[in-house]
Structures are given as structure tokens and as C-alpha cells.
Amino acid sequence: MARRYFGTDGIRGTVGQAPITPDFMLKLGWATGRVLEPRRQRARVLIGKDTRISGYMFESALEAGLSAAGVDVMLLGPMPTPGIAYLTRTFRADAGIVISASHNAYQDNGIKFFSAEGAKLGDEIEERIERALDETLTTVSPRELGKASRVDDAAGRYIEFCKSTIPDRVNLHGLRIVLDCAHGATYHIAPAVFKELGAKVSLVGAEPDGLNINQEVGSTHPAALRAAVIQQGADLGIAFDGDGDRVLMVDADGHEIDGDDMLYLIAKDRHERGELGGGVVGTLMSNFGLAAALESMGVPFERAKVGDRYVMERLAANDWQLGGESSGHIVCRHVQTTGDGIVSALQVLSYMVREEKPLSRLLHGFEKAPQSLVNVSLSAGVDAKAVMADPSLEQATRAVEAELGDEGRVLLRPSGTEPLIRVMVEGRPHLDVEGLARRLADDVRELVG
């Protein structure tokens, strides 16, 4: 069946617009409860959220829908998305639900689902939920209604889990770290993790008010973190997105360390210690330099379509442990079932501490090909797929590819989370990838008006 609601990263939209309304969330909770096959006599679902103001409203709606279907609900409150994946497993719940629009602004929201194993729901379950949404909502008998409870120690449980993902002998004593929590779900988790491991921590973006999530802070706006690291003379900075599944870093000089850099460092560390367990999965956006560096170490590298779901699919198919995106969504399957910003940062810091070298030294010799990414906004009602299929755009793309020859590549793709078409051009240093990307972006803008 054609998908109406579920994208590659759950269900997203602007609050108040279809389908992101309280009525829809109520029905979604009920439909989910109808589809779940409980491990025990009664199904149990965890609900967590980030810090945007609409989370309170949607939490109540989902809770009511699940209860009407006879499902018990455990409310976690503000919690990073990977924390909900972890707690879904540890509580032996039948599913976990995250209310979050990740790196988007506060007026957007969305829903992500995790299976009992802490992985994204499979297509078959999502399709069954979509079919159930067409049914008439009927409430179970009063005796069968689901119960709701709050999990008071959810934050503490996840903090201890994060700390457990690096060896006990590794501590962060002496490191001065700036954390940017994007006014999001990591604001009460990340500071505790890094402080308890011994680091001296200062904070940016750790005062959520429901409206400021991702506002000029976080992994999509690193300028605030960069300035704080330089001003304070810190050893490094770490920035998360609104729901804590993405991360980027900056070194002591303020240079950005993106997902490709971190994948390289984690892979190099684990490869040198004989613990990598296969190859690395990147995406179509991963830099040429990452593929070349891994291949020079004898580490296989494979590209998946953009999106953590596709990265996870290839990791599972190959039985590999490490993969991710240049945006900072990194999956370390040896310790976690989904992308986890805190856990990924700890893997890098663990390598840094063992080697007793700053980030810049660890990255010495790793060279990325120049890459230019331009986002073209789409007006309401514009069909991104139709734009991508336009013959004039295909011709313009071929012209740029001809100029690059075998020394570069072009990638155009619709965003999976925002009304954008992303234009990426990558090539050897002597090529004007920035100018070519701008030219192709102008062609897209002309098509979309």
C-alpha cells in the first residue's frame, strides 16, 4: 500500500496541520495499540519526548489512545531518542514512542517508533498501523483500559547506560568540554554523563523553555559552540540536536568535526584494536575522503541511501557494527541499537584519552574532498519528486557531472524531514565545487519558482 504517514524517520509535520494534530495522535495511539502483539497478558508502551511545547499535548493524546486500546503506558518525560530505544529494551516493553521533530524548530513535531528490540519499526508493522487508522475507534471495556505510570528514574538509568559504553578504566579527568544541548532532550542527561566521568563541563543551549529548541544552537548551528570553546580555551566542544541522536564536535581551535570525521576516528580505533567487526556503512552523502581512508586501512566501506533506517539495514545485512551519516547520526551497534549522540561522542573521547592526543592530532592525515551542500527551500504544494524528474534539471545535472569528470560527483535529493531539495557537489581540491553547487541550486530554484 502507498504510505500516507510514515516516512523514513517516523511521522513529521507542523503542529496543527494534518496529520500532526491531537485528534490524529489519539487515533495513532489507538491504532498502535490495536496492532501490537503483547509479550505478556497486556501490552506495554513507553512514551518519551523532547522539550518542545507541543510534546505535552501529544503525550496526553497518545496516552489516551493507547489506553483506549487496552495498552499500559509508561511515561518517561523529556528523554533523548536513543534513551527511549534503550529503556524500551530494558523494561521489556512492546514498543517505544518518541515525540520529537529532531533538529527542526519548535513549531514542528513528529513521532518515532521503536520495536521491543529498540530498533525502528519494520515496514510490515507500519503498514498495519496505517490500515488500523482507517478503522472506527472503539474503546475496550472499563476493566480492560490501559493504565499509565511515570518512570521517575528514567534519566538516571540512561545516564548509567551511557557511561557503561566505554571501559571503566577510561575517564575524562582533566578535559575541559563545552556541551551544546540544543535546548533539547539531552539538557539534563549529557551534563551528568560527562561530569560523572570526570570532565570539567560548561554548557550552551541547556535552558529549554518549550520554544527555543534548536534555535541558533545545537548540531545544526555550531557557531555558538565554536565561540564558547575558543573563548573558554576548552579542549573540545560537543553539540547534540534536539532529540540527541545526532552529534558533532569542534576541536580546541574551533574546527568542526562532523559525522565522517567521527566515523573515521571510531573505525580507526576499533580496527587498530581488532574490534571493528567488519566494515563501515556510510551514505550517499559520505565524503570521498572517508571511503579512501578506510579502504587504505583495509576496512570495507559501503554506501546506503541517506537515512538512519537504510544505514541500519545495511549494517544488519552485513553483520557490521559501525555506520552513520556525515550529519552526525552514528550507529555503534556493539553498544546501542540506534544512533546515539552521547554514546558516539564517548567512543571518540575514549580513543582520544587512550592515545593522549587532541582531536586535531588524531585526525592528522585524514583528508576529505571539498564538498559543497546547498539547500533549496520548497513552497507549500511543490512536489519534490516532480522537480527532480524534470528533464531540464537532469540536463543541468549531466552538464555539471561532465565538468567534474571522474574527479567528483553530484547528488540531488529531497530532504526526508524538511521541504527542501539538497544539492551536493564534491570533487578534488582544484575543482570549483562551491560554484558548481550554486549553479545547480539556481537551476532548482528556477524550476520551483
Image (tube, rainbow, N blue to C red):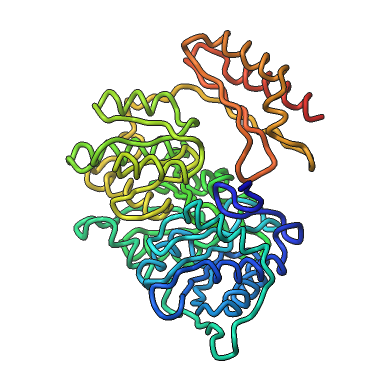
Quadrant of residue 360 within the rendered picture? top left
Count of numbered marks: 0
Q: Is residue 380 left or right of residue 12?
A: right
Answer yes or no: is residue 199 visible.
yes
As drawn, is 255 to the left or to the right of 343?
right
Query: Is the residue 75 above or below the residue 174 in the image?
Result: below
Residue visible at 72% across and 30% down? 386
Residue 277 lies left or right of residue 408; in this view the side is left
Horizontal and vertical percent for residue 443?
73, 21
Q: Nearer the viewer, residue 379 or 26?
A: 26
Which residue occupies the foreground of this view, 35 or 237? 35
Tell me where residue 59 sits by quadrant. Answer: bottom right
Q: Nearer the viewer, residue 206 or 40?
A: 40
- In the image, farthest residue toward the bottom: 143
Residue located at (18% from left, 41% from top):
273
Q: Residue at x 34, y 45 (%)?
A: 316
Q: Would you place residue 138 above or below residue 115 in this image?
A: below
Res. 323 image quadrant = top left
- 443 over 308 or under it: above or below: above
- Residue 422 position, x and y percent, is 62, 32
**Quarter of the image where the C terminus is located:** top right
Q: Position of residue 429 (x, y in %)?
A: 48, 15
Q: Is residue 190 in sight in this rendering? A: no
x and y percent of residue 184 in the render?
56, 60
Nearer to us in this view, 54 or 392: 392
At horizontal 37% and vertical 36% (from top left) the residue drawn is 281
